[in-house]
Amino acid sequence: MDLAWRDHHHARDQTWRALQIEAVLGAGLVTVDAQHKDLNTTLAAAALVIVAALFGVLISWHHRKLERRKIIHVYNCEEFLGLHRDDLLPKKQEGERLADKPAHVRDAVVGFPEPFSWWRVFDIRRTNTALFIMRMHFAIIAFAAIVVIARYTAS
């Protein structure tokens, strides 16, 4: 279980690191655009940002699959150890309504992370860290496109 948790946290750290690199490249794009004021230079810098963000999307997608595998492994170990009880680690049963459980149990319910789908990524009603990271990749792509369009219209 410990190894599965460490793998999960290592993958999450890598995902955040990819997003940080994209953000730094995005800041660099603004700097390049402000210094050179040239469409071709801005376009080249934006292409770098977009390619990095697309790789970030792929990394995030892969890490979500890894996260699900690791969490399912941990969940199965917890189940084997008999830890899934309302007084320890409550779990959501098939077809069970969480509203029927007391608040302190509802807040502690464990379950599997949902798999990614394009609909979930763009459904703002769904919130979790993995979806936030994925949305930030797309926001950085949109930002790079906006900088290029702004430079094009200014030229």
Image: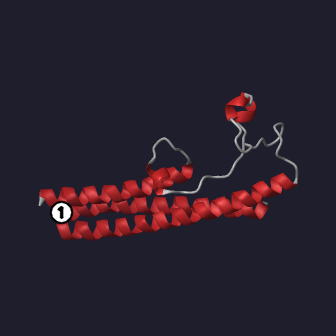
Q: Can you say whether 45 is above or below 146 in the image?
A: below
Q: Identify the residue shown where x is 82% and y is 53%.
A: 78
Image quadrant assignment for residue 22: bottom left
Name the quarter where the C terminus is drawn. Answer: bottom left
**Is residue 81 visible from the viewing direction of this image?**
yes
Q: Work out whether residue 35 or residue 52 is closer to the camera in this orientation and state it.
A: 52
Total numbered labels? 1
Residue at 20% of width from left, 70% of height from top? 40
Q: In the image as oriented, which residue stretches furthest toward the right? A: 81
Categorize mark 1 by other alpha carbons within 10 Å: few (<14), some (14-19), many (20+). some
Where on the picture, by quarter, is residue 31? bottom left
How far across and how far down the image is residue 91, in percent? 75, 43
Q: Quadrant of the N terminus?
A: bottom right
Coloration of the structure image: secondary structure
> Residue 103, how many percent across, how many down?
71, 29
**Residue for point 75% across, 60% down:** 73
Residue labelled with disc 1: 37
Helix, strand or loop at mark 1: loop
Is 142 or 20 nearer to us in this picture? 142
- Give the residue furthest to the front: 95
Residue 34 at least partly seen: no
**What type is the residue that disc 1 sits on?**
Lys
Percent across and percent down for residue 137 are 43, 58
Q: Position of residue 12 (x, y in %)?
A: 60, 59
